[in-house]
């Protein structure tokens, strides 16, 4: 019965589930079968194009960016943006699960370690080179995963971002 | 090899999902299997849900819908197929599951997409279901090649309203898709409750009490389903028993989206904007997301519904209209969940001599009237309806707080306004509860954990023409003999008392077959002379061909019926010779033009 009550708790309590996972990891890790997508093949085309095609398909991003906006009122643009924003945002969330790099609020003090990586810390102002304490101006972003769709079309379609649509 | 996983499969009308639990490592959480599927030609993406849609591609498109486990596919299941439902409706199969329980058509015949033109190679509802299940099975086998699905403990869910023949067809599709022989069929509302029980842990005994009556209210995309489960005490232990299941009601979230789209179209018309066919589809989708926001209870007072321009002129062609939250709420809430009396009955379709043979969509979209009728039908007597004290919501539509509140309020008004039924506590995963609960059930089946008892949700009858003087022009009066009682448990047998029946040797024996969700006290052998349309529903007939056999008397063999519910919940009806040891199993005949 203990086993079952543990199960029940894991179901409802992710933090507890993590703890159990860590507890059992050592002995179980070798024989654990974990479902994963079949070994990924080399992408059939640049994943940048696959991403752009997905954002166009789901959120019409390419249509939006390619359209000259000079002639439209802010209200007209705003109406379109809401939809594009929502749909592209949902796609980004699915592919990358984007989160702020730092959890502190903007303006909070941040310690920059010595030998920091400039890809993770961008120092602004009087940059001395040694470890410093500063104020967070932008928390940064990170992708917590990268699950791109797999493309397997014909080579001549590799650069196609959206098919032409024909009413028949 | 013993099963390593318990797998729960929710084969839904609009979405399917697969959840699994490791049987060898107690304490592992139930997880969802990501399902790789075609999202655009040549583009594969894993998603947690597999939309139950199937696009039958013209031959020149073959190759664009390949999956890691299938080359040269000329059809696609899942996300892309769902989108094609709008762009190429004549080549897209939708709602195959609702067709499975439509007795007016032969479900093994290629009839879908319904009304598709000649050049489309149609498929049968059973075949469509097989393809969805095969997609799930292949996704599983690709992800866990060491543990093939055919060797796992698999639980597949079906609507509680599915009768014996719809279950049989579901099983047929499942076995053809490579699911194991010992596949268990579980009713969806029960699966939803199992998911809750698993999440609540031992706490369920504190939340549900003896004497409680739980209404599982499941409103999905295309269908609504009700089930009542009683909480009793047996030998000092709390026990759950399924008391009643409702009919298959073809009203759901899609109807709400369409209603909202209609509202939006009217608003556009007032602004002088005409919505064309393509925009109507986009509008439907826009209304779906607007509905979720507006009904969530915290959305803005006004929600813009926007249809982006066709072609590459996106901003220039965009049309937008503001929907008022109150107007939307009252349209949807009052339209689909109107206040009504407990004696209310759903309006019937007016009988016209000419009825299209498609799916029997409900004439009355008022879900509360269907619910009132359900509770009254299952009451102790005609005057008193069953009073639910607790409610478990399921189905994506019920994420909307406004709909949940209205349901509770209306049920409260039928019994005691001050004490409306309370929803079960805890967090509910309305999209995946059925798949998760099915996996839990597969795990608990070994004897541990709580089980909901119930047996068959219906009683079953064989139609027998009464002997008597023939009257020209009038069919012989038909009587119905009960062969399986309501609540017959798995693994039991019932002998049907009463007169023997003579079956002709060498000819097909053919029986009309009926079921009832409301006649709970008939015993095997009981004979009904008359019944109302509400009580008995005719389903597919049953048949068997008897070879020449011992004990033949002038070409007849006297037989009795014996009914059996297998351990896997399959109803079997046998003709047992009364003069020899022989017996013959009757099979469902789902062919068109069976004697009905």
Image (cartoon, coloured by chain):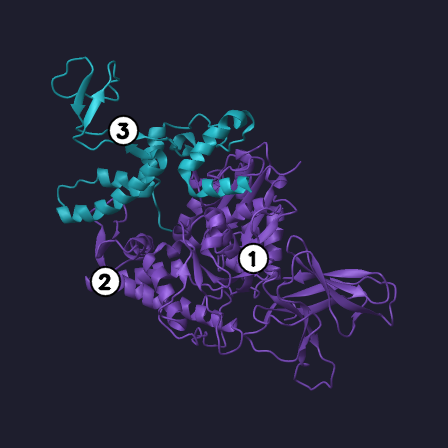
Residue at image position (34%, 62%) is: B405
Q: Specify the label residue B267 is tagged with.
A: 2
- 3D distance between C-alphas at marks 3 and 2: 44 Å
Q: Is residue B459 above or below residue B168?
A: below
CB within 8 Å, label 1 to label 3: no
- Res. B171 in view: yes
Q: Chain of mark 1?
A: B
Left or right: where B462 falls relative to B68:
right
Chain at numbered mark 3? A
Residue at 53 percent of width and 40 percent of height: A2
Callout 2 secondary element? helix
Q: Nearer the viewer, residue B239 or B484?
A: B239
Q: Quadrant of residue B560?
A: bottom right
> Residue lying furthest front in this view?
B236
Number of numbered discs visible in the structure rendering:
3
Asked if labels 3 and 2 share a chain, the reply is no
Chain letter for purple, please. Answer: B
Q: Which residue is mark 3?
A: A101
Q: Quadrant of the N terminus of chain B?
A: top right
Location of mark 1 (residue): B239
């Amino acid at each position: 019965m203990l086993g079952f009550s543990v199960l029940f708790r894991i179901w409802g309590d992710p933090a507890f589930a993590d703890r159990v996972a860590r507890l059992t990891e050592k002995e179980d890790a070798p024989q654990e079968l974990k479902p994963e997508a079949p070994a990924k093949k080399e992408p059939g085309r640049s994943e940048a194009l696959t991403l752009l095609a997905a954002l166009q398909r789901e959120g019409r991003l390419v249509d939006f960016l390619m359209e000259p906006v000079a002639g439209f009122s802010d209200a007209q643009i705003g109406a379109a943006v809401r939809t594009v924003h929502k749909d592209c945002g949902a796609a980004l969330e699915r592919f990358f699960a984007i989160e702020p790099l730092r959890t502190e609020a903007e303006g909070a003090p941040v310690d920059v370690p010595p030998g920091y990586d400039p890809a993770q810390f961008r120092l602004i102002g009087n940059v001395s080179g040694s470890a410093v304490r500063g104020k967070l101006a932008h928390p940064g972003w990170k992708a917590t995963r990268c699950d791109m769709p797999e493309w397997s079309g014909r080579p001549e379609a590799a650069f196609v971002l959206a098919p032409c649509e024909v009413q028949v | 090899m013993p099963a390593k996983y318990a797998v729960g499969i929710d084969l839904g009308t609009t979405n399917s999902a697969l959840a699994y639990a490791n049987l060898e490592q107690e304490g592992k959480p139930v997880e969802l299997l990501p399902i790789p599927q075609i999202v655009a030609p040549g583009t594969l993406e894993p998603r947690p849900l597999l939309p139950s849609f199937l696009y039958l591609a013209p031959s020149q498109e073959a190759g664009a819908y390949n999956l890691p486990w299938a080359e040269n596919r000329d059809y696609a299941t899942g996300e892309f197929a769902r989108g094609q439902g709008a762009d190429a409706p004549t080549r897209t199969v939708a709602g195959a599951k609702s067709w499975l329980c439509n007795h007016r058509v032969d479900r093994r015949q290629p009839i879908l997409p319904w009304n598709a033109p000649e050049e489309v190679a149609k498929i049968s509802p059973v075949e469509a279901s097989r393809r969805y299940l095969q997609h799930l099975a292949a996704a599983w086998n690709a992800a866990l090649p060491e543990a093939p699905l055919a060797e796992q403990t698999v639980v597949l869910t079906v609507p509680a309203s599915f009768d014996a023949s719809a279950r049989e067809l579901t099983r047929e599709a499942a076995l053809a898709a490579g699911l194991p022989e010992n596949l268990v069929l579980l009713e969806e509302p029960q699966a939803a409750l199992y998911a809750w029980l698993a999440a609540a842990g031992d706490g369920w005994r504190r939340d549900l009490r003896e004497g409680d009556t739980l209404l599982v209210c499941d409103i999905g995309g295309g269908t609504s389903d009700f089930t009542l489960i009683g909480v009793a005490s047996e030998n000092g232990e709390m026990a759950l028993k399924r008391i009643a299941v409702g009919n298959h009601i073809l009203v759901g979230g899609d109807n709400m989206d369409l209603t909202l789209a209609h509202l939006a179209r009217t608003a556009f018309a007032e602004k002088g904007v005409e919505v064309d066919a393509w925009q109507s589809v986009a509008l439907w989708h826009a209304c779906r997301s607007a509905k979720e926001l507006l009904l969530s209870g915290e959305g803005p007072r006004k929600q813009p519904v926007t249809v982006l321009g066709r072609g590459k002129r996106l901003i220039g062609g965009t049309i937008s209209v503001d929907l008022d939250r109150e107007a939307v709420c009252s349209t949807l809430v009052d339209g689909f969940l109107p206040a009504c009396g407990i004696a209310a009955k759903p309006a019937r379709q007016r009988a016209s001599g000419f009825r299209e043979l498609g799916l029997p969509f409900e004439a009355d979209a008022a879900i509360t009237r269907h619910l009132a009728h359900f509770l009254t039908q299952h009451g102790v007597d005609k005057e008193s309806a069953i009073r639910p004290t607790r409610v478990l919501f399921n189905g994506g539509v019920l994420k909307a707080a406004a709909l949940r509140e209205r349901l509770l309020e209306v049920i409260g008004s039928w019994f005691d306004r001050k004490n409306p039924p309370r929803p079960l506590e805890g967090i509910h995963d309305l999209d995946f509860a059925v798949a998760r609960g099915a996996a839990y059930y597969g795990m608990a089946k070994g004897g541990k954990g709580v089980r909901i008892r119930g047996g068959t949700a219906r009683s079953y009858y064989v139609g027998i023409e009464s002997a008597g003087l023939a009257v020209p022009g009038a069919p012989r009066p038909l009587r119905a003999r009960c062969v399986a009682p309501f609540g017959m448990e798995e693994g039991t047998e019932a002998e049907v008392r009463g007169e023997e029946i003579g079956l002709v040797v060498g000819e097909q024996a053919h029986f009309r077959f009926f079921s009832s969700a409301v006649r709970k006290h008939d015993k095997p052998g009981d004979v009904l002379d008359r019944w109302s349309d509400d009580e008995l529903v005719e389903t597919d007939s049953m048949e068997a061909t008897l070879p020449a056999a011992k004990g033949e008397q002038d070409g007849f063999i006297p037989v009795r019926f014996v009914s059996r519910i297998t351990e896997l919940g399959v109803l079997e009806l046998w003709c047992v010779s009364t003069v020899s040891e022989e017996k013959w199993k009757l099979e469902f005949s789902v062919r068109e033009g069976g004697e009905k």
